[in-house]
Amino acid sequence: MYNSRKKPMEETPEEITVIWSCTSDTCKGWMRDNFAFSAQPTCSLCGSVMEKSEKKLVVLVNSSFPPTKSS
């Protein structure tokens, strides 16, 4: 009876998002482009160079200050 009134989960919107992916074969690190701190970020997990790519992700809005990416 506890779960009998559970509301059905709403479908979350997804879209193709620009991300930065780690180039190291042994690391799975990635971050959204609009959450990166620099124009050419390095992986925070292993320190390797990152490259731009795309991934289908849940839509998130970065409500922090306007991006001020510097090299």
Image: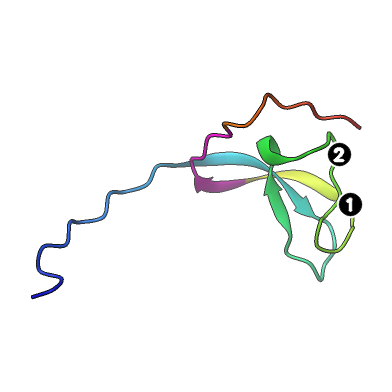
Q: Quadrant of the C terminus?
A: top right
Amino acid bearing label 1: Val
The percent coordinates of residue 58 (x first, y second) are: 48, 46
The residue where tag 1 is placed is 49
Q: SS of the residue at dot 2?
A: loop
In this picture, which residue range is highlighted in magenta? 55-62
Q: SS of the residue at dot 1?
A: loop
Disc 2 residue crowd, few under 14, some 14–19, many 20+, Cα 10 Å:
some
Answer with mark 2 or mark 1, whichever residue precedes in sequence.
2
Residue drawn 89% across the image and 57% down it: 48
The percent coordinates of residue 51 (x first, y second) are: 81, 46
Residue drawn 48% across the image and 40% down it: 59
Amino acid bearing label 2: Gln
- Residue 21, labelled with which disc? none
Q: Per the image, is 26 magenta?
A: no
| Horizontal side, residue 59 vs residue 55: left or right | left
Disc 1 residue crowd, few under 14, some 14–19, many 20+, Cα 10 Å:
some
| Residue 6 vs residue 46, the one in the foreground | 6
The percent coordinates of residue 45 (x first, y second) are: 80, 62
| Horizontal side, residue 18 vs residue 14: left or right | right
| Horizontal side, residue 27 vs residue 12: left or right | right
| Residue 57 vs residue 6, the one in the foreground | 6
| Residue 12 vs residue 67, the one in the foreground | 67
| Horizontal side, residue 1 vs residue 43: left or right | left
Proximity of marks 2 and 1: CB atoms separated by less than 8 Å: yes
Determine the image quadrant of residue 9.
Answer: bottom left
**In this view, 46 is above or below 71:** below
The residue where tag 2 is placed is 40
Residue drawn 79% across the image and 38% down it: 37
The percent coordinates of residue 13 (x first, y second) are: 40, 42
Q: Per the image, is 58 magenta?
A: yes
Residue drawn 81% across the image and 71% down it: 26
